[in-house]
Structure formats: structure tokens, C-alpha cells
Amino acid sequence: MMYSYTGKILHVDLSTRKSWVQEVDADFLKKYIGGVGLATRLAYDNVPPGADPLGPENALCFACSVFAGTTMPVGTKHGVAFKSPLTGTIGDCLSGSHFSEMFRRAGWDGIVITGKASDWTVLFIDDDDVQFLDGNRYVGMGTTETQEAVRGHFGDENVRVSSIGPAGENLVRFALIDNDGRQVGRCGPGAVMGSKKLKAIAVRGSQPITVADPEELFKETLKLIETSQGPGTAKYRTLGTPSNVLNMNAMGVLPTRNFRETVFEGAETISGEYIEQHHKIKSVGCSGCSIACEQWAEVREGKYKGSRIGLDYEPLFAVGSNCGIDSMPAVIHMVQIEDELGMDAMSCGVVVSFAMECYEQGILTKEDFGGLEPNFGNDDAAVKLIEMIAHREGIGDVLAEGVRRAAEQIGKGSEHFAMHIKGLELPGYDVRSLQTFAMGMAVGTRGGCHNRALSYELDVKGVVDRFSLDPSRGKMHMEKENFACILDCLVLCKFLRNCFDDFYPDVARIFTLTTGIPMTAEELEEVPVRVHNLKKAFNIRQGWTKEDDWLPPRVLKDPIPSGPSKGAVINPDDLRVTIEAYYEARGWTSEGLIPKSLLIELGLDDIAEDIGVEEAVADIAGSE
Amino acid sequence: MANIGYEHVICDPDKCIGCRLCEYACSLTKTGAFDPSMSRIRVVRIEPVTMTAITCRLCEDAPCIIACPRDALTRSQEDGHILVDEDRCDGCGWCIEACDFGAIVLDPKTKDAAICDLCQDQENGPRCVEVCPKDALELTTPEKLRQKTRRAVVARLFEELLEQ
Ligand code: SF4
Ligand code: SF4
């Protein structure tokens, strides 16, 4: 008997308006757990090789956390996986809160959405009843506006909604899916949803979530809730992630003016401390979260008066320092419209900063921008550009493709400063001054993302020399990557990561108290290794090659011009050697491919047949 | 003893972060499963930053008791919480209509009204108070609350005076 899990995956085909149920057993669930693990498995099984990310054949795969709706703190979350329209690789994302709880209470471990509706549709999953409702009346609405309207239609606050905004409708490649202000943010899931003409997914669940040992589970989770009010989460509970702004600036890591510089003279006024003094309304939490990291801020005067939003570090860097903008009111306003239009604020900020650099270098002109003069620091132009991107107006149509494709179209050397890895725009840490992290992102399965590995900790905390690379980093990075991956499978918020005495035994026990499925620490530790190989296998099958594991030209050629990280640049030879050391640590070939034997050892026999390589004798000889 | 009102659970909206762990914990305690729709305490978030938790306030002159046509509701002599006589209750829902706080739920299984009983059987008192990560919930009486409010306002006045 298993608890919390139902062993049921809902498949929905929008083209035929049919749905069916796939039954899975405890062994299967135990292998992938849930969240990103299960979602990735579903994506592997349902996205055919060579699929067009924006075609009906792409599958949007949701998988719930096994802890959603329970007192396990920060566990009310879900994962989503699909083929990313930005990278062509796996897009594995997380979101959380009320939607995740309803997803679990509706009785599904996973939901797989394929096909394409003939007209705008709202998918309504009411426990095990699936309905296809007219979505036309919501077209053009923003993300939260759509959710309120859909909920209003049912007149029931138990209906929780995930929706796209205009950007998703217009297939902006970095469009997101929003649920109650939490987001399936990166890699363009909103574009995939838009390509299916799916405006919103509404879920209502009425089933109680039963667990194997309610009393013991309550005791364990109560302990964690208490620990989560302690020093391990202090940073997130006080200023939240915006406290990074001044820290990163002081280290010479804060991307400034499209990653040209790493110190921003205006950092003070876009800092967490500044929010706290001038704009803070309140910290709020996701459903099931005991930490409450989200800093709600509002603008009280001036031209952006009335704008308000929950802020994190990443959007602050992206539309702040990276666009040379030092006005907090402007930043709050831009993040709010990005969220409402339904675009990833990180990618969008980096796209705008790319456009600004094109303008300053004369690659694009005032005419190209339809009369705008987007110099760095020009917030009016930035706001306008964000809107043009969401609606694909003028130059916005090119920029909506993301920096990789935009640079390919624009040319004239703009590729040099198109700041992406595998097509995904970079996060808010200059990688020249955090080199373990740089290598980690180069090999990352979803491209320029900081969240799928936690190896920046090694650089930031001084465990290693952050300005150089050597082969020892390969294994160190792998370990951080595995740890991030298990959190994403469970799903537990990364901000809880410092609250466990002994992570694997503790969590294995909590998993068993919840599901009734026996789990040892060793078995749990194998899960992220399996899931990471699965993500890599997905990419290999979709056409990944070794050349894709690389960094943008700027960080390999332009030394950081000033500040504490002055002179830092990544040496391509060292990068190559470290990447190979990472492959070796993973047990992959020097070409980054996965040996059959490894896949079989991980219980991925079917995948070994698809993409596994025979252990090449020449390969091993070559590396000796 | 002078009647100074019954103890009940209140929520400080400034401290509440809207996590709903109180609902999860309450439903687990009362039903053995996580099922917020059965929780005796509910969190209301009317917009992203405005929220609070609400449960039975153990009204002095309880409208639910008065409203019940079958006299199924009575008050506990011990601590004043509302007792539901399951043999009498037929799930008609008059009490739900009478309660200004939406504090009563109808259990779909037993078809009876269910109301906060202050977790009488729990060693550490109400589970919602125990689980709340931000100490937003408190078991208090109107009198204690008045005392606390007075102290807070006086402290604030003096602070302002001292600053001048
Ligand atoms: S259930 Fe409602 S009406 Fe009855 S005592 Fe409690 S708060 Fe008052
Ligand atoms: S547990 Fe506390 S902070 Fe969380 S919703 Fe309930 S009252 Fe608010």
C-alpha cells in the first residue's frame, strides 16, 4: 500500500480532446520520486526525438512533490519538464504553492499534456474529471488576471490556476507559466503552453492526502519547521535573496551593463537593504512554506507609483544593474509588468541589456528601435522594450526569440555579447569571477542556470580559488549538482538545504513516513545520479553534442575591466580540461556520452538501448 | 471567577505569511489526513500580502448555539468550546449561516458540523498554534488580549516620547 502517491498519471491530448490514465507502481515512483525527476522521466517517454519544441509533439509534463499539501515545510511544490524552445534541451522547472496542493489532492502524481487545441482552451481537471473549456475570453489577459477570471468563472477559491500571459500567447521563447505569483519560470514553458493554445490549467482537488504515519511525520516536520526559523535560513527570512545585490557587488560578481562590468555604481539603490527601508510591504510565503522569502515591495511616489511585486535577487540584477538602471521604482515596475505579461524576468532582462549594448555599439539604430534610444540606464526605453517583446512589436519580434537567435539574426559581431549558454540567458553571477560555477553552467543540462547546481557556493565561500579552474572541480561540481537534483525531485525548496542534521538518512526516513515505501539513504542518494543521467540522455537524444557544453565568447575573451575581480577571464584550455574531468567523474566518455553499462547500473535499461554507447576501448586508452 | 471570556485562537495578520501549515496540521489532527477543507482553522488571503487565519472565537453569546434548530450545539462547561452532539446534528447548516466567521465546517463523511475544540486531547495544546512558524497564532482570551494591546500602545507612546 502506498500513501500520498496515487500511482496515476493523467495524459491529456489537446488535439483530440481525449484523456487517459497511466498506472505506475511504487518501484517506478521510487526511482524518480516526483518533481523534476518524475517530470523528466515523463518528458523522456513522451517527447519524441527531434520534436519541434513549439509543435504539438512536445509534451508539457507536470509532476507533483510527494510532500505537497503536507506539513513537510517548503514541500508543497511541483516540477514541470518539456523540450525547451530556447535551448532544444530538457527544460526542467519548479513551481509551488496552492496549485501544487490541488494537484496532489486531485489525485495525480503527474499530468502529461500533448497535442494542440484548435482554439484557445482552458483545461479543467476536477479530481478525475477532465474538461476542455473555451479560453478565448481570457486571451490578452495578464497572468494573475487570467487566474482570477478563471477562478471567478467557477466561483470557488479551491480552483487553483496555472496560466500564461500575452507573452506565452505570442510564443515569446522565454515566456513562463504563472500560478499565484509563483512561476515555472525558465526555459520557455509559457511558449510551449501557448503553442498548444492552452491559456490556463485549472485544478480542483477534493481528496484527503493520506500518509503512512501521520503522527511521526507530524513530529519530524514540526522539528524541521522549527529549524527553518534558525540560522540556516536567516538570510532568506530577513532581506531575502535581494541581500545578494550588495554582497555580489562587493565581490565583483554583479553583472553590470550586459556583463561588461561586475561592479555597479548604483547597487545601493537596487539592494535588499534599500527595499527594506523604502519599499517593503511584507514577507510572504508559498503554501506550505515556513520561511517566507518573498519580499513584497511597492512604489509609493513618482511615475511608477502604485506598482508592486514580490522581489528576488535575479530579476533585480537582470533589469537593474545589468541594464544600468539604478532606480528601484523602475525595477519594481518592470518586474511587475514582466510577471503580468508572463515572461521570465531573468531572460527578459538579459535580452533588454543585449539590445542596449547593440544600440550603444551602433549595431542597431534609433530607427531599428522605432524611435527609442535604449542607452544603458534608460528605464523608459526598457519598459517600452519589455512591452514590445511581449507583443512581438517591431524589434521586439526579434528579441522575443532570446539572445542566441536574436544575435544570429542581427549579426555584426553581436554574438560576442549574447550572454547565454545553450540558448538560455545567464543568471546574476559573472562567471569569470566564479569559475567552478562557470564550468558547471557550461555542462548544465538546461544551459545558463544557477539553480540546477549549487557550485557557486564553492567559489563564493572560498572553498576553492574562484578565479581559476582545475580538474578537481569536475567532481566537486558533480556533487553539488546531485544535491540540487535530489532537492528538485523531492521537491524541497533549496532554502531549506542547511536545516538537516544528516540529509540523506533524515529525508529517506521522512519519505517513508509519508509514502510507506521503504527507502534507505543509499537508495535515495542514487536518485539524483539516475535523474541527472536521464536529463543528459534526453539531451543526447534531442541532438546534444560536446560543442554545446561551452561558454559565451565574452567571458572567454574580455577580462573583467575593473573592481575586485579585475582581470578575471576564463582560460578556454582550462575550461576544456575541467569539463573532461567532470565527464570522467560522471562516468561518461570523453565525448560526454553515457556508457550503456552505467545506464543499466542505474536501472535505466531502456534508455541504454536508446542512447547508451559501448565502452569505447579507444576512448579509455586515449584518456590514459 | 468573573467571566472574562473564553480562550480561543487568534491570528496576528502582520505576522501571518499565509503558509497554511495551520490548516494542514489541523486537518491531520482532526481527520488523520491532510485535507484543508476539513480544517477548523482557515487562512484567507484576499490579495498577495493581505491574509489572516480564522477559527472559532467561542462567542460569549454564541449565535451558532442559538441558531441550531435541533439543540445539537452546547458549550463545554470546562473551557467553553462548542460541543456537537452527533446524534442530534443532521447537517442542516443553520449554524454555518449563523456564524460570522465561517468557522464551522460540514464533514462530508459524518454529515455533521465540526468546530474547533481547542485540541483538548493534545498534550501541547492547539496544533495550529504549535505548528505556526511565525508565532502568528495565539491562544488567548479577550481580557488577555486587552491587556496586551494596552501594554503595546503604552510602550509605543513612551518610545515616541523618548525619541523626541
Ligand atoms: S462557531 Fe462561529 S458562531 Fe459559534 S461560537 Fe464559534 S465563532 Fe461563534
Ligand atoms: S501557520 Fe501561522 S503563518 Fe502560516 S497561515 Fe497559519 S497563521 Fe498564518
Image (cartoon, coloured by chain):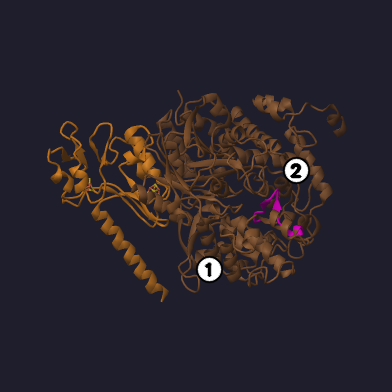
Chain colours: A brown, B orange
Q: Percent from the top left, x then y, of residue A575? A: 79, 47
Parent chain of label 1:
A
Return the residue nearer the eye: A208 or B151. A208
| Residue highlighted by disc 2 | A473
Q: Percent from the top left, x then y, of residue B93? A: 20, 41
Q: Quadrant of the C terminus of chain A?
A: top right
* Circle 1 SS class: helix
Q: Quick check: is A421 in the magenta stretch?
A: yes
- Give, as a single range, the part of the protein colored magenta: A415-428
- Kind of residue at badge 2: Arg
Parent chain of label 2:
A
Q: Quadrant of the N terminus of chain A?
A: top left
User: Can residue A288 be seen in this snapshot?
Assistant: no
Q: Quadrant of residue B162?
A: bottom left
Are discs 2 and 1 located on one and the same chain? yes
Q: Residue A418 got which mark?
A: none
In percent of the image, x 48 and y 51: which residue is there? A292
Measured Cα–Cα span from mark 2 to mark 1:
40 Å
- Kind of residue at badge 1: Pro
Q: Residue A329 got which mark?
A: 1
Return the residue nearer the eye: A450 or A24. A24
Lower position in the chain sequence, tag 2 or tag 1: 1
- Label 2 crowding class (10 Å Cα cut-off): few <14, some 14-19, many 20+? many
* Circle 2 SS class: helix
Q: How many discs mark residues in the rendered view? A: 2
